[in-house]
Image: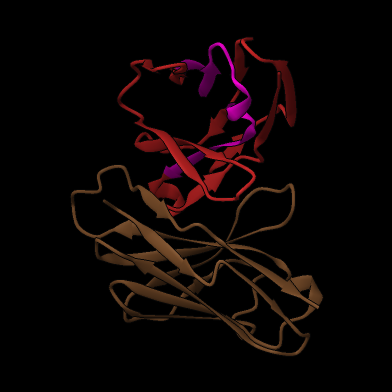
Amino acid sequence: GAVVSQHPSWVICKSGTSVKIECRSLDFQATTMFWYRQFPKQSLMLMATSNEGSKATYEQGVEKDKFLINHASLTLSTLTVTSAHPEDSSFYICSARLAGVFNSYNEQFFGPGTRLTVL
Amino acid sequence: AQKVTQAQTEISVVEKEDVTLDCVYETRDTTYYLFWYKQPPSGELVFLIRRNSFDEQNEISGRYSWNFQKSTSSFNFTITASQVVDSAVYFCALSARGGFQKLVFGTGTRLLVSP
């Protein structure tokens, strides 16, 4: 159980275009989803926290107008990189936190990641 | 503030050697959670273990073992008789109420196991 999927697994796009990445919790409901970015040979950096039905909370230094997050249901969150540029090329990973009191460890379940390359 | 330090950037060992990956954390919370993840070249994070701050028992799972010591704020990870398939980046992470329960990752330790 507790499987999270991401789509697409990789994408190559031209500079200036927008790219949407989907994150789905397949077998559980997630009131909270997280989006991380990982540059080569670096750690995961939290970009934003997404709560179902409300606006995402962005970390300091992350442009909310550039990285649009929508968490429309308890199983789906999307990240749209608008007007992508080469410096946005990175590995984007989402995670989902199990809703309810059973998740006593605050555990997050991670998707497999999406590799974005902007030419 | 929450912080996780993995001082070892890269470790190289020969197969069958034992290796310990260090993790030191900082938090003011009395209730917190610690995790270890493995990230192979494919990029997908693989969950290895979780611990809450009230459970200081060490754990062994096959060739893996973890040593949690609150007195030194450390949560070290040992691989016994390492194998080539253990080559990956390993991340230690912390989640605490004071950090709004977000996961804070260490910088990771790259383990290279050669045959």
| Tint applied to chain B in the drawing | red
Is A7 located above or below residue B56 in the figure? Answer: below
The percent position of residue B56, horizontal first and vertical second, equals 35, 19
Q: Name the residue furthest front.
A: B115
The structure's colour scheme is by chain
The residue at the point 35 percent across, 65 percent down is A32
Q: Position of residue A21 (x, y in %)?
A: 53, 76
| Span of residues in magenta | B71-95
Classify residue B60 by image quadrant: top left
Screen quadrant of the C terminus of chain B: top right
Outermost residue toward the left? Answer: A101
- Asked if the magenta segment contains residue B88, the reply would be yes
Is residue B1 in sight in this rendering?
A: no
Q: Nearer the viewer, residue B2 or A103?
A: A103
Identify by letter the chain in brown. A
Taking the magenta stretch, the answer to whether it contains residue B73 is yes
Q: Nearer the viewer, residue A50 or B115?
A: B115
Q: Position of residue A19 (x, y in %)?
A: 61, 83
Q: Residue at x 19, y 49 (%)?
A: A102
Q: Quadrant of residue B58?
A: top left
Residue for point 50% across, 57% down? A112
Q: Nearer the viewer, residue A83 or B28?
A: A83
Direction from residue A75 to residue A59 in the image, left or right: right
